[in-house]
Image (cartoon, rainbow, N blue to C red):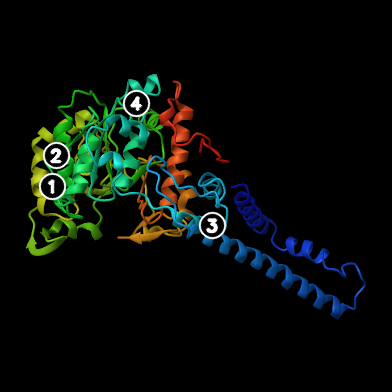
Amino acid sequence: MDYIWDFSSFYFKLLKITDSLGSPIQGTLRKRHPNYGEKKAPGEEKMNQLDATKSGFLVCIGICICIFTFLYTRNTIPKEADEDQPYPESAECGFYPDELCSALFEGKGAAPQIGQFCQQSTHPSEIPACLQSRGNCSRIFQGLHFITRPLSAEEGNFSLAYIITIHKELTMFLKLLRAIYVPQNVYCIHIDEKSPKDYKAAVQTLVNCFENIFIASKRESVVYAGFSRLQADINCMSDLVHSKIQWNYVINLCGQDYPIKTNREIIQYIKSKWNGKNMTPGIIQPAHMKHRTHLSYKEYVHEGTAYVYPTKKVKDEPPHNLTLYFGSAYYILTKKFVEFTLTDTRAKDLLEWSKDTYSPDEHYWVTLNRLRDAPGATPNAEWEGNIRAIKWKDQEGVVHNGCKGHYVRDICVYGLGDLQWIIESPHLFANKFEPTRYPLVMECLERRFRLKVLQQAEIPSEAHWQFQENSYFNMKINI
């Protein structure tokens, strides 16, 4: 394997040199010209310099082509799958993926192109072997690297509840869950009723191994922008208020989220900025959003097709003369506020009124949290609260530098070139990720995140908590 590393090391060094020095490389190559140093006529000297520059450029291109040909040949040789090795052996891409991840986090110009090539050999299994049959709990804990003890006294004394709504990409859900999992928290998983049977079975196998993870007692066929999405959260809340774990706050996530901040950092953020208050970013409903609640909408679900469509029916005004707000569907809420939403007459009436509105989760939580007598209310807040980092298409060039992956419904699915932006964000979580399309994005984030978690721990690390025996990151962990 040493000769492979020699090739890849040279390739990385070549790219780093060309990226940082540019034209001085050509000067070095000119010095190696056999007639270098002889006095030339002005025209002849210019021609020789041009020839030398072309020669140097061609040499670089030639070397790159040779290396890529070599790497391609090696990648086409089939390898036996190893279920116990969570990451593919890719030494031809350096200390994979750590060296590439470090370059991506630091924003190195050539890193995304190299990463795109190297991640082609990564094909994560949709359903890991340990979830394909029951009775493998010890293998799940250790093989999937779940943290099994509170990592600090502060965390052990402050429990969080999570609502996670999922419907696809089991691999992504597993990555999310093991990132946010600690035994003192509690987790409600809402599985879309439309999800395949083998998907539901795999999640159930996983959940059976944990006392503090459960599947919502009532499940919805979730439709994008429909009331069913809001109802899924309500279902989990109804279960969570009866949990034996005395949680302080609840956070809702979807299956394509991933944390930027650790459990400890999330708790510290809540305590320092929002102690006893709810986070529901949003403003009074703007004019261009009034159509969402002015007309009546219906959900259509049939044979794999699901969507929301408007009718011609005009809705009545909101109940109790409530002022409607518009904001994020993501929140961080106190337990007392959750109990309020499940019992208060205004909350229940607003929920009923919202059943035929468009994307009601974007007005329901923020509207209730602006009521002055609601527990933990923030009546004067607007967009405060760093809950979710999202690259919206209409904010390109203003809030962010563009999506390096691709847009889905005007939300960026992160690519390799987005990694630096993600880890430098002040937000607690990021959305959205697709590991099947951009596997290296999640590998980099996972490895960095776990290193950061273990670095902050106040107790000795157990062997199975680590993703790899040795780390080759060259990066700032504490960003």
Q: Nearer the viewer, residue 148 or 254?
A: 148
From this view, report whether residue 30 is shown above or below residue 278.
below
| Separation of residues labelled 4 and 1 (CA atoms) | 31 Å
Question: Taking 329 as reference, is 479 left or right?
Answer: right
* Dot 4 amino acid type: Thr
Instruction: Confirm or deny contact between disc 3 and disc 4 (CB under 8 A).
Output: no
Q: Nearer the viewer, residue 356 or 226?
A: 226
Going from N to C along the chain, the mark reached first, 1 or 2, is: 1
| Separation of residues labelled 1 and 2 (CA atoms) | 9 Å
Find disc 4 in the rendering and name its residue: 148
Going from N to C along the chain, the mark reached first, 4 or 1, is: 4
Question: Taking 455 as reference, is 295 left or right?
Answer: left
Instruction: Confirm or deny contact between disc 1 and disc 2 (CB under 8 A).
Output: yes
Find disc 3 in the rendering and name its residue: 114
Q: Nearer the viewer, residue 223 or 386?
A: 223
Q: Residues within 10 Å of mark 3 (few under 14, many from 20)?
A: some
Going from N to C along the chain, the mark reached first, 2 or 3, is: 3
Find disc 2 in the rendering and name its residue: 235
